[in-house]
């Protein structure tokens, strides 16, 4: 096979709307592995959230060795448990939280010390009720101010209006040159340390596999997949509306259903 490593996003890509992996996608991944391919999961999720899907996939002898989480802020070798972590210092986290106080929004902070899904700072009344419910469901810790323990992998910022996020983005880009800021859908932003991308993480992983960058294929659906889509050897996208992603991908699927299987069966196994 020409493309020896396949990087796969989870939400909106491998996972259905009900957060399941279809039998067709699993069967195609098994066939790709049988033909000598290596599979890497690259997601914006935390390791706790992503591992349940990796474990399920490895039940089919896919032998996934590397997991990229938080958009590349955390790379885990699942065999020897070695990690590469790129974090946002607690001082910068505090400045980010302070910078968004004027907006009706919430900051979801993925702290390196969190045993669960992270901590939440709510700065607007609208989000108080929403995150009160989420805190119980996801075991989030609601906090009033940033402490030294909040060195973080990623910050999610949620706003009620897309225009609010545009204003926050402009402010962030002006005040923080050392952060990577990506708009995630209409109502949220993902913030990581500068140069933290799935693509930069993949470049690190491919060295361990002795795979060239142009031998990597990838599939994704969001702006956090864009650098991979632009730079890898062969790229697939899943979107109807994101013109930049569509224009930069080799193959675009309009629908998520079994897109991973289509990418493997119709392209990767035949190229």
Image (cartoon, helix red, strand yellow):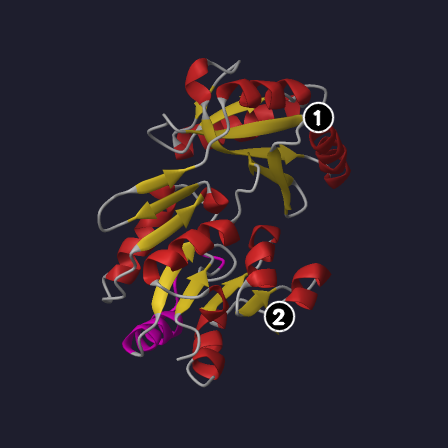
How far apart are labels 2 and 1 at the CA level? 37 Å
Q: Is residue 21 above or below residue 148?
A: below
Q: Nearer the viewer, residue 193 or 203?
A: 203
Residue at 47% x, 57% y: name it.
9
For the question of whether residue 153 can be seen, the reply is yes
Q: Quadrant of the N terminus?
A: bottom left
SS label for mark 1: helix
The quadrant holding residue 194 is top right
Q: Position of residue 122 (x, y in %)?
A: 58, 22
SS label for mark 2: loop
Q: Residues within 10 Å of mark 2 (few under 14, many from 20)?
A: some
Q: Magenta residues, as a range? A: 17-34
Taken as a whole, is the magenta stretch helix, strand or loop?
A: helix
Residue at 36% x, 25% y: name it.
113
Mark 2–mark 1 CB contact (< 8 Å): no
Task: Say whether residue 116 is magenta.
Answer: no
Q: Which mark is residue 102?
A: none
Is 103 on the left or on the right of 262, as rendered? right
Q: Position of residue 228 (x, y in %)?
A: 55, 58
Q: Position of residue 187 (x, y in %)?
A: 66, 41
Q: Position of residue 178 (x, y in %)?
A: 61, 32
Q: Residues within 10 Å of mark 1 (few under 14, many from 20)?
A: few
Residue under pointer 2: 254
Residue under pointer 1: 175
Residue at 56% x, 26% y: name it.
129
């Amino acid at each position: 096979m020409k493309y020896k490593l396949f990087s796969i996003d989870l939400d909106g890509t491998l996972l259905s709307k009900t957060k399941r992996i279809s039998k067709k996608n699993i069967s195609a991944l098994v066939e790709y592995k049988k033909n000598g391919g290596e599979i890497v999961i690259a997601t914006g999720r935390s390791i706790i959230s992503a591992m349940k899907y990796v474990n399920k996939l490895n039940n089919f002898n896919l032998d996934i060795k590397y997991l990229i989480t938080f958009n590349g802020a955390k790379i885990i070798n699942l065999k020897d448990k070695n990690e590469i972590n790129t974090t946002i210092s607690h001082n910068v986290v505090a400045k980010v939280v302070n910078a968004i106080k004027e907006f009706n929004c919430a900051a979801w902070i993925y702290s390196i010390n969190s045993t669960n899904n992270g901590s939440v700072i709510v700065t607007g009344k609208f989000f108080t009720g929403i995150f009160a419910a989420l805190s119980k469901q996801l075991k989030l810790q609601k906090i009033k101010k940033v402490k030294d323990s909040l060195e973080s992998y990623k910050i999610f910022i949620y706003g009620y209006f897309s225009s609010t996020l545009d204003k926050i983005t402009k402010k962030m880009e002006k005040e923080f040159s050392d952060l990577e800021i990506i708009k995630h859908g209409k109502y949220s932003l993902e913030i990581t340390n500068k140069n933290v991308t799935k693509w930069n993480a993949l470049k690190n992983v491919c060295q361990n596999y002795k795979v060239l960058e142009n031998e990597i294929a990838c599939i994704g659906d969001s702006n956090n997949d864009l650098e991979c889509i632009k730079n890898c050897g062969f790229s697939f996208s899943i979107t109807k509306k994101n013109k930049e992603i569509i224009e930069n991908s080799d193959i675009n699927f309009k629908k998520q259903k079994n897109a991973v299987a289509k990418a493997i069966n119709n392209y990767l196994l035949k190229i």
